[in-house]
Image (cartoon, coloured by chain):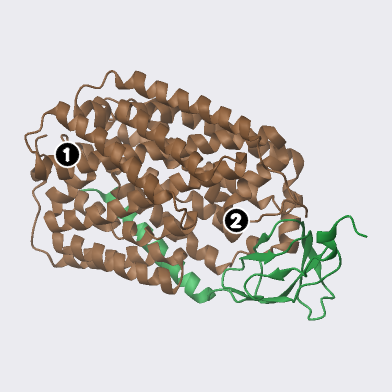
Chain colours: A brown, B green
Amino acid sequence: MTDSNVLLAPSTGYLLLALFSALWIGLGIYWGKKNKSFEDHALAGRNVGLALGSATAAATWITSNTTMLAPQFALELGIWGMLAYSMAAFGLILFAPLAKRIRTLMPHGYTSGDFFRLRYGRVAWGIFMLFTLFYSLTWLVSMAMAGGILLEALAGIDYVWGMTVILAVCVIYTMRGGLTAVIGTDFIQTLIIIVGIVVVGFAVLQNVSVDEIHANLTASKPELVHVLFPAALMAIFNNLLFGLGEVFHNNVWWSRAFAFREGVGSKAFLIGGLVWFPIPIAAGFIALASGALNVAVPSPDMVGPLVIASVLGEVGAVAIFIIVFCSLASSIDSLLAATSDLLVEDVYRRFLKPAATPERLKSVAQYITLALGIGTWAVCVPRIGTLASVLFFAGPLVGAMIWPIVTGLYWRRANSVGAIGGMLLGGGIGLISYFTIGWFVASTIGTAVSMVWVLGAAWLSKDRYDWNLLKEDA
Amino acid sequence: MSILPGAAHAEAPSFTNGGEYSSDTGHVLLSWEADQRVTLSIAQDPDMSDARTLYSGTQTSYFLSGLSDGEYRLHLEGENGEVSEPAILTVAHQSLAQALWLTLIGLIITAGIIATIVRGARDD
């Protein structure tokens, strides 16, 4: 195997960066003109239709991790790893019925924090806030870092400059356009990403056949096609549960459940999940072809760009640059908007200024978005950690929140003792297993412990929750 | 007199972590120091009789994955013939029994979540 030149000319990289930055900011400002109140800004007027709803569900879930980490999964864990990553689609698919239930139970709700506060009380809400902010900020930081690293690797753009531009663009259009801009740009980004991945997949198949890929893997990387590959087997349900935990708890998805028009949520999340499902498989397939294509991989998180550049040359480098930029923007904007709304609704409005006007709340949301952007930038500048390790540290924490949420939405006997114990025990023991066994078991173990505790507490409980308490007025 | 004095006095390439690697997942990121083009080879026989080339070029790292249980020897050879001390990579995968148990637990949890959602709120 020999070296591959993957670098796009920096001038081309800067040109693409400038063009797409101008496009997203322009659209954000245009769409933001209609926003007058916090409800317009945070929930797009609760009137998002099916096409935009499905696209935003798929696009937000297509992160740079989908396009970059899915190939890494395939390269490390083989066929099972590729399928394991695609299991995260069940997060969206199973959230479809939850979205309908959420909208029915909480017609005036704003955030997932509202649910924890009203359903389980302040202590559970506090633990939820700690876990979700850790997860959201970790995701935000990992996306921004990935952006800087990838732009540097693809086009020689300095890490700090690339990371700064991506963050700044997302902060500007999210501040100006709120969820309307986030969802609108997501729609365009989804189309670009799907077309890009399909084109790249066909291009790889033009250069090497499936038989050649299989023969190469069998000869030089046999474990990647082995049915009983232990770490890969453990990763399947671990990743599925991680995906479920991410979607079920996070305000990125709850805000969409509240924003979608009546009757749209369940269909939009189902379609979004089905659209998303094949993307990690296509991205992972690209990585499995690396050996047959003689592409040497100096670092696992770069396998996708290296193979694409090897197959498509400069056109491929341009394609992956655009796909990466769209993947990053579609996730960073959603995280900025949803985390900002969570802090405005759950902290500012509920604790500090209950009488704040809708205009004031919108203004505070914009400042918090800016502060989140600056904070993320400050954490990212030193360039600490790797894509996978930063992301998976949060796995057991989000897994431990699945059962408190599912039972809290459907069972009147689910209670705060179960929710608090489930989150603390599941998160704690899951983290211990993360360090003692590996990331590929942490979410499974965290969710299992939480499940046992939550079910036990519900079984022993004589309390019956009054669903009307969730219908708190805005 | 050489027109490439750097190459003439190049030191033998060397693995950066002292040449000891272990993995329970079959993958490892190899890295080395070299001031010249290198060829990286892997073998399972101590005498390297079954060696195969993994990489040839100027990179200073290589991601190796998909290896089965066993002990592997890795060599770096510079373009002027200097050879590194061999690195030893020991691969011992996680317990298959543990993996199958955790897969079963994951399946049960997932089935429980789906059943809870599908069953819905019967006690409203």
Q: In front here: A207 or A37?
A: A37
Mark 1 or 2, nearer chain start: 1
**View extreme (right): residue:** B1
Report x, y in % for residue A398.
33, 56
Question: Measuring 53% from the left and 31% from the top, which residue is drawn there?
Answer: A17
In this rendering, is residue A195 above or below B103? above
Can residue B122 be seen?
no
Q: Which residue is mark 2?
A: A300
Question: Measuring 53% from the left and 39% from the top, which residue is drawn there?
Answer: A324
Question: Measuring 90% from the left and 59% from the top, which residue is drawn there?
Answer: B2
User: In the figure, is residue A341 to the left or right of B114?
Assistant: left
Label 2 crowd (10 A; few <14 / some 14-19 / many >=20): many
Q: What is the chain identity of the residue bearing mark 1?
A: A
Residue A160's disc number = none
User: In the figure, is residue B76 to the left or right of A122?
Assistant: right
**View extreme (left): residue:** A355
Q: Which residue is mark 1?
A: A106
| Badge 1 amino acid | Met
In this rendering, is residue B19 above or below A195? below
